[in-house]
Amino acid sequence: MPQLQAIWNQFNPRERLSAIGAAVIILGWIVSLASYGVGAGTVALLGAIAVLAILYLKYAPNQNITWPAPTSLLILGISAVVALLVLLDLLRVVGVLSFFGATAILAILLEVAGAAIMAWGAWQEYQIVKPAMPSMGSTTTPPTSAPSSPPPAAPVPPSAAVPPPPPVTPPADDNDEAPPA
């Protein structure tokens, strides 16, 4: 337990928010067991465990892992997928919510709140860190910028005001009053 407390103390506030959201999702899943599995989904549980595992391994004293992408991007991706799946789960459960008991309602609310907290913390962390996107195996060099063209010339001011032409009167036509043929 002291090792977990030491790792918790190393978390920044945004990582703590993601960890709290993951813990709320796990709590919602446990509550859903009391309602015969209605409420929190297993994929949300696995995503929450994955976020906690990444955060733990990031600060564990004897771990030196080369991540395929920055950890803030991994946590944001997992949190976004979990949030999307939780919203879909919420839409599925809302239609038949009256058939379930209070524990199912509590479980789905805990799952939605946990996913929202986890995604919000991950998004805040990503906004702070903003890692460079991986190149995905691309070996091409970035394109060079084209030489800049000279700025456009200033518009020529209009010369002396020329009066508009006089209105043209239409020619007199005798067939205006006649009915169409």
Image (spheres, rainbow, N blue to C red):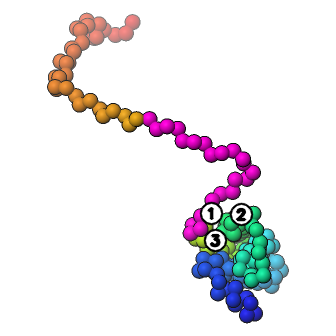
Quadrant showing the N terminus: bottom right
Quadrant showing the C terminus: top left
Tell me the SS state at disc 2.
loop
In percent of the image, x 79 and y 73: which residue is there?
A: 46
Is 158 on the left or on the right of 97, as rendered?
A: left
Residue 166, above or below 95? above
Question: Pointer 1: what residue?
Answer: 131
Residue at the farthest right position: 36
First reached walking from the N terminus: tag 3 or tag 1 = 3
First reached walking from the N terminus: tag 2 or tag 3 = 2
**What whole-number distance in Å separates the C-alpha atoms at marks 2 and 1?**
9 Å
**What span is colored magenta in the figure?**
127-149
In percent of the image, x 29 and y 7: which residue is there?
A: 175
CB atoms at circles 2 and 1 under 8 Å apart?
A: yes
The dominant secondary structure in magenta is: loop
Question: Pointer 2: what residue?
Answer: 69
| 96 or 6, nearer to the observer | 6
Q: Residues within 10 Å of mark 1 (few under 14, many from 20)?
A: few
First reached walking from the N terminus: tag 2 or tag 1 = 2
Q: Specify the amino acid type for callout 2.
A: Ala
Residue 135 horizontal/vertical position (percent): 70, 53
Q: Specify the amino acid type for callout 3.
A: Ala
Q: Where is residue 115, by image quadrant? A: bottom right
- Label ID, residue 122: 3
In percent of the image, x 83 and y 80: which residue is there?
A: 36
Q: Is residue 130 magenta?
A: yes
